[in-house]
Amino acid sequence: MDDRLLLIAFGAAVGVCSGLAAVALSHGLVFMMENLSVFRDYWWAFVLPGIGMAASSLFLEKVVREGAGHGVPEVVYSVSRHGGLLRLRSSFSRLISNCLTIGSGASAGPEAPVIISGASIGSNISRLFSLNERQRVTLVGCGSAGALSAIFNAPVAGMVFTIEIIMGEWSAGNVVPIAVASVAGAQVTRLLQTHQISFTHLRFDVDVTSTLAAVGLAVLTALISVLFARSLRYSHHISEKITLPVWVRALIGGCMVGAIGLLLPGVLGEGYHSIQQMVEGAFAPGLALMLLLVGAKIAATALTLGWGGSGGIFAPALVIGSFAGLMYHRFIVLLLPGFSWVDEGCYALLGMAGVISGTMHAPLTGIFLIVDITGRYETILPLILVSALSTTISRVFEPASFYLRELVQKGQYLKPRTDAKVLADLSITELVEKDCKTVPRNMLLGDFIKVVQDSHRNHFPVVDEQTGEFQGMIHLDDIRPYLLDSLMYETVFLEQVMQTEVETVDIHEDLSEVLDRMDANGLFSMPVVSSSRFVGMISKATLLDKYRHELMVQTMH
Amino acid sequence: MEMQMLHIFRNTPLGRETLLESAYFCKRLDILPVVYVPAYVKFLMYFENDVVQVDLDGSYLRSPDTARDHVVEIVESMGLPAPKFLELKHFTASTLPDIPVDYDFMCCPRSITDMSSKIGLGYIGPRVRRIVQNARFPVYIPSAVFKPWQSLAVMFGGSANALKALKLGIRLSRISGFPLDVFTQEGRRKRKDYEDIIDSEGLGVEMDKYVRRWRFFESRSFAENLYEIPHDALIVLGAYGHGLIKELFFGSTMETLQTVSPNSMLIVGPNYRASV
Amino acid sequence: MELKIDEISSCLELPSTTVERWVRQGRIPVKMIGDTCLFSDTALRKWAEEHNLPYHPPGEQQQEKQEETSENLADAIGRGGIYYHLSGQTVEEVIGEAVSAMKGIESESDRQALYESLVAREQMMSTGIGNGVAVPHPRTPLSQTGIPTQIAVFFLDRPVDFKAVDKKPVYVLFVLVAASSQQHLHLLSRLSYCLRDATFLNLLSEVPAPETLITKIVEFEARLSGGEG
């Protein structure tokens, strides 16, 4: 069967499965909320998020022994380094832990959990059918797209997010199956889900002044995004320093979130309800309170995710964004009351796009998510403006997307078709030239010159003839002065002329590190030595040859 | 010493025996031991078509301060040069390292996820099984107490994996100089059929050169006949040669063997590439 | 088609680890079952072409490059011939006589070209290498002419002054014509190995019969290649 058709068929199947996972999670969340809402009014309700987070972290650590973070970075890591291999347990573990976290009221989003579940479903389906890495990566993308489009009922956003963040590249081979999966996921959700966020009945008349004023909102959301990303990391950092067991940490963190929630209930949970109110213009609080809400939501999310809760930043970013949008609207109305401004709901939408684009460095995702959930294009001009500017400004402060930041710092993020990816794929074993003749250390110079005559190389590794251990290297330059001196022929042993301070390469080393060392020492070739045995030479000349082939093979499908 | 063997060190008396076994294996076959002293309870192994998560038993993390010294002491006591320690480079998550899989051998106790009290005959842990299924390298399952083996015993049942095991046995015999015995349980196929398989693989010369004797069991069950395997032999065998499902239902050489024999075993999985 | 992984990697002139990785990553139209590769010949050929990679399926004869340095002296002399009794008095005369005597040169223009380049080379710097031996040769290979690689040996009736390095008059010429510089150097180095030997020079001074000379050269060459291996 044709490769492309096969992938489309698999993509649709994966999209349906991940859509089902997303529907399951949102039903679980509704169930939890309904059953726990009766306790909300008691004074001790603040421990609820604590208990939920503790249960969630216990489940992750002890029951499924997941041991990994919130989801998206793991998917990106696996796609960029391991051809999309993901553990089977990841396909459900985050759903349950996330259900416990959000259901109990802690502040997080359900998107990252469904993305990793969908991705893991895709990965495991392709493992079952022994598909190759390229196909597997595509199916991982399909899973993520299907899940995201199902949880938001936003097919375009699901697709765009997957391509922007997870895959890191647009290619014809990927886009079609991912689009199909996105459609499948959204369709599943439309069939099975009766309540969704959708603002299709809203109309906004956006005029020039409102569009221009959006520039200010872009700056605001960019700054908020940076603050958000940094407080998430900071909170994680603090909690790691505490030596208590994970579940105790989660309990403490959860109680703090609960305490914030007692004062400002709007920050709890994933927050879709507040978003709904804000966009529809039914949200009462004034400017000062909005500012407080933005801060509180950031704090609650940072505590939840940093201290052991399980979830994503997508929904909190939307909530923060709409708070920010509303706040900005109140501010400009106060400042310039003479103008006629568009409804505050519109600014809430713009704020969402701004914060999403700012934290994730994914402007297209921000734009299309809003277009998807409103189903209209009236807001498109300020939307593009806010998303693009917000990404650009936040890039000044944060070098990489929140999801990729850690990977980029560790040098683990390998964008497809880049130098880093090509170098990571090539291994020393593939590059080593084995046609080098070794010479014993006790060889006379005269005999060595005969060896040189028959060889077409300039480097000669010297080994110990008894143990076979690598001793050093001789370059033709080292013997050049004695080349015509026949007296030296019979009196000089190779060990006297060889270089012993040689930089060597281990066969298991990463190529990028080897190249860095070559550059640092100004070398063009290095001997590969594995447990003190000479294996071969590695040279920049062969590397260029292989590098070009690899690049060609990777860029053309 | 171009071959490398991965060993995951457990800093307990049991772990000492296991490392002694590994060190002896490395000494005899001129292999460099690469020792991982676990820093986290979990790690991942990314194979070609599967990712295996290993959750170590808590005892692996015990007394990390003395672990490295113990390793060096044990390995050097076997007359080997100092071992290489595995330094973690890649992490899937901050506490979830990836362990490279490009080694020539790996040493696994019968179970690495469970408490040491569970380790005994008749049980091979699910993680170890998955490693065997996916690995490009043969997996060395040491016996509980260190005992220097003096010969090699290959279980040869005629399957593709058994052939790989035979090739590996021949290679190890060539390197180590220890005698090699081949054991075959006759079933539907007769002696002649097995000899034909050997010939069609072009192993005739090597068989004559390295194999001390080829025992055919004609009567009695395989389990009973296992008494014939020398007590001080390293058993080399193939696993999952017929596919996992079939073996679950009909049993396999590996299952019978590991319940009956306490010898150290070297298991060759379906992804191992054999050369003589 | 079905091939083992090693075979297919040699078809593509790549290390088998690379091919295996490409199969795993799905970058090459090959499927692998165990260590057996399944693929369609036309698809792989097209793929290799697109990616600028060589592809020689087994069966398809690989063009073996002619080993240029495998030429030996005895064969070259066999092609060039051994001639006696050259009677010229000057360098130009001797060379002119030698060139017109040489067999294996088809057109007169080639003969003329060879003569001119030999004389030009002599004028620049004598090819008399001492002990009465000269090795006249063109400075650059005459590849545009059809002259095959050869060495022609000429014994002179009367020694001629070639302005050799040791001022001794020359009584034997080895005219060396090669199709490429590599062959030229290769043959020259072999010839000089013989000419450094006193017994060989003694033999030359006795003006040996063609068979004797060839036998001696074969013997020397055997020693030379024996020393190499």
Image (cartoon, rainbow, N blue to C red):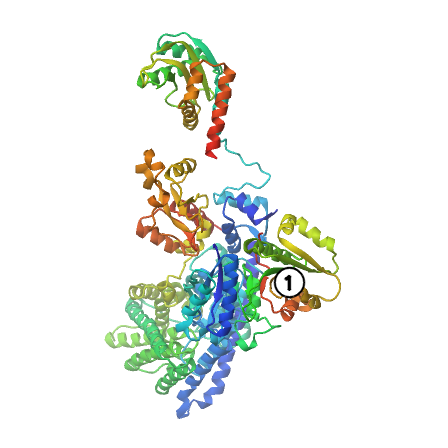
Q: In which quarter of the view is residue A391 placed? A: bottom left
- Subunit of mark 1? B
Q: Nearer the viewer, residue C223 or C178?
A: C223
Q: Nearer the viewer, residue B195 or C166?
A: C166
Q: Is residue A509 above or below residue A233?
A: above
Residue B156 can be seen in this image = no
Q: Residue furthest left?
A: A335
Q: In which quarter of the view is residue B90 placed? A: bottom left
Disc 1: CA contacts within 10 A as few (<14), some (14-19) or many (>=20): few
Element marked by disc 1 = loop
Q: Is residue C203 above or below residue B197?
A: above
Tell me if C13 is positioned left or right of A494 in this view. right
Q: How many marks?
A: 1
Q: Residue furthest bottom?
A: A42
Q: Is residue C206 above or below residue A106?
A: above
Q: Is residue A387 above or below residue B12?
A: above
Residue C222 drawn at (x, y percent): 49, 28
Residue C139 can be seen in this image = yes
Residue A236 drawn at (x, y percent): 36, 75
Residue C45 drawn at (x, y percent): 54, 43
Q: In which quarter of the view is residue B187 placed? A: bottom right
Kind of residue sitting beneath label 1 = Gly
The residue wearing badge 1 is: B243
Residue B254 drawn at (x, y percent): 63, 66
Q: Nearer the viewer, residue A426 or A28?
A: A426
Residue occupying image coordinates x 34% and y 67%: A358
